[in-house]
Amino acid sequence: MQKTMGPLMEVARIQSEINRLFDNLLDLEDSPGGAGNWMPNADILETEDTLVLKVELPGVAPEKLRLSVHGGNVILRGEKNRPVAEGAVEFHAAERQFGQFKRVIQLGVPVNTRQATAELNNGLLEVRFPKVPNRRGEEVPIEVSGK
């Protein structure tokens, strides 16, 4: 049985997409011509005790990737280099994206950012954040005693 996202996670996902679109528009305005910018795809998964962020970064070297957290947002910056074609080459199709990228992803769940771990393996970045217990908005049962 597949677990679906609750309504609050769906709202957080929509807000994240809206933020991503506006961030992308602002980045395109700031860069000369906006050429070469691209946006990596991401998934956010939540388990009982961990929030997992997975980002597709095929062809991005770890030394070309910068990862930080600011105000509940994960900020990814980096660059994917265009491979050098040697000799007389004529492209028939060129669909892969290259160049610099910046992606801001809103986590939407309180997490411990200081204990986060990140691993880039086979073009997939996986960042794991331990969740903060008893976060606001979570239903916490209170025991009632009687006399």
Image (cartoon, rainbow, N blue to C red):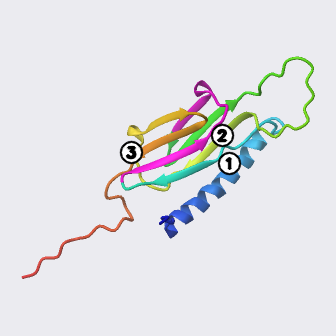
Q: Where is residue 15 in the image (x, y as percent from the top left)?
A: 60, 60
For residue 129, which quarter of the picture?
top left
The quadrant in which the C terminus is found is bottom left
Three-letter amino acid code of the residue under disc 3: Asn
Q: Nearer the viewer, mark 1 or mark 3?
A: 3
Secondary structure under badge 1?
Answer: helix
Q: Where is residue 103 in the image (x, y as percent from the top left)?
A: 63, 43
Residue stretch in magenta: 49-68
Residue at the spot of label 2: 102
Task: Name the residue located 59 percent from the left edge and 43 percent from the top edge.
Answer: 55
Residue at the spot of label 1: 23
Three-letter amino acid code of the residue under disc 2: Lys
10 Å crowding of disc 1: few (<14), some (14-19), many (20+): some
**N-terminal-most mark, 1 or 3:** 1
Residue at the spot of label 3: 112
Q: Do the CB atoms of the residues marked 1 and 2 lie less than 8 Å apart?
A: yes
10 Å crowding of disc 2: few (<14), some (14-19), many (20+): many
Number of numbered discs overlaid on the protein picture: 3
How far is mark 1 from mark 2, CA to CA? 8 Å
Task: Name the residue located 66 percent from the left edge and 35 percent from the top edge.
Answer: 58
Q: Where is residue 134 in the image (x, y as percent from the top left)?
A: 31, 58
Compared to 12, does 52 lie above or below? above
- Left or right: 48, with 95 as reference point: left
